[in-house]
Amino acid sequence: MTRSLVAFGVRRVAGGLLFVLLVGASAFTLTHFAPGDATIDLAATGASADVVHAERVRLGLDRSLTEQFLRWGRGLLAGDLGTSSQFRRPVAELVVERAGDTALLASAALLLATVVGLPLGIISGAMPRHWVARVTEPASLILLSCPPLVLSLLLLFVAARTGWLAVESGRLALPMLALALPLAASLERLQAQAVRDVAAQPDLLATTARGVPRSRVIWTHVARQSLRPVLGIYGIVIGSLFGGSLVVEMVTSWPGLGRLMYDALRSRDIDLVTGCALAGAIFLAVGNVTADLMRALVDPRARDAA
C-alpha cells in the first residue's frame, strides 16, 4: 500500500463524513419546515389543545429551530439520534434494525447484478454478433426503461400467478430481483461501451496481431482495463440502488430502511426521518469511497486525478 493510496483514501473518507453530516443537517431542517409535526395525528383524533401542547413540550417541538438543531447536534456527537415520537423507541435502535435488512437486500441485489451484468457486458462489447449479445442488448434496454414500481408490480404479479417466487413479507428473492435486474442492465450497457472503447486501443490491437488468442485478450486484458470507467460510477449505482429500494420495499413488503423512512415522513417524526437520512447517506458514502478505492487500485492514475 503506497503513500499516495493512503492519502487518496483519507481524502475520500473525509469527504464522505462531510457528506453524511450535510445530509443529516439538511434532513433535520427540511423536515422541520414541512407542514405539520409529530402531534398532527393526536390533534386529528380530537385531543384537546392542552393535551397537544403538552405533547409538543414533551417532544421539544415548542423550542426554536436553533435550539432543536443544537440538541440534535449534541446528541449526534454523543451517538444519540433521539427518540422516535411514533414508535417511542430510540431512533438509533430502529435505524440499525431496518438498515440491516436494507443492507442485506441491497448487497444481494448488487452482487447478483454484478455477477450477471459485467460478464454480459464484456460479451456484448467484444462480440456484438454473438447470440448472447443479440438477446442481451434489447433485454437491457427494456429493463432500463422500466420504472422500479412497474417492475416490482410485474414481478409480484408473475410470482402470484406462477408460484415461482414467494410473495410473503420478508422473503428476499422477489425484492432482490426487482432491484437487481435494472441494475444488471445498467452495468451491462456501461461495461459493453467500456469494452468497445478499450478494445480499439492500439496496444490491444497489436497484442491480437501478435497471435495472442482473442479470448485471452478479451477476458484478461480488455476486461481488466475496461473496469475503470465502470468502477467510477459504482458509487452512483449504489445511490440509485438505495433510492429505488424505497419503492421496492413498499410494494414487496420488505421491512427495510425505505419503509421506515416512509412511516417517519407520514407521521412527521423529525428525529426518525433524520436518522433514516443519515443511514442512507452513510450507505452512499461508503459505496462511493469503496468504488473510488477499487478504481485507484485498478488504475493508479485515478489517485492523482482526484
Image (cartoon, helix red, strand yellow):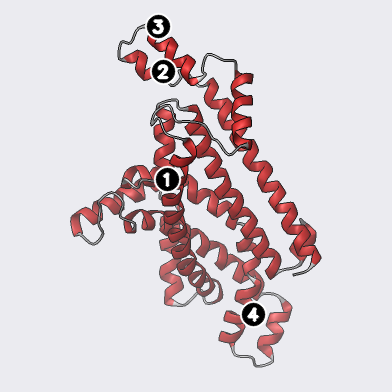
Q: Which label's residue is closer to the chain start, 1 or 3?
A: 3
- Mark 3: give few (<14), some (14-19) or many (20+) Cα within 10 Å: few
* Residue at screen point 62% across, 19% down: 67
Q: Which mark is residue 25?
A: none
State the CA–CA distance, disc 1 to disc 2: 24 Å
State the CA–CA distance, disc 2 to disc 3: 12 Å
* Residue at screen point 59% across, 22% down: 68
Q: Is residue 258 above or below residue 297?
A: above
Location of residue 36 in the rendering, given as x and y in whole percent from the top left corner: 45, 18
Q: Nearer the viewer's eye, disc 1 or disc 3?
A: 3
Q: Which label's residue is closer to the chain start, 2 or 3?
A: 2
- Residue denoted by label 2: 39
Q: Nearer the viewer's eye, disc 2 or disc 3?
A: 3
Q: Nearer the viewer's eye, disc 3 or disc 4?
A: 3
Residue toward you, 191 or 152: 152
Q: Which mark is residue 98?
A: 1
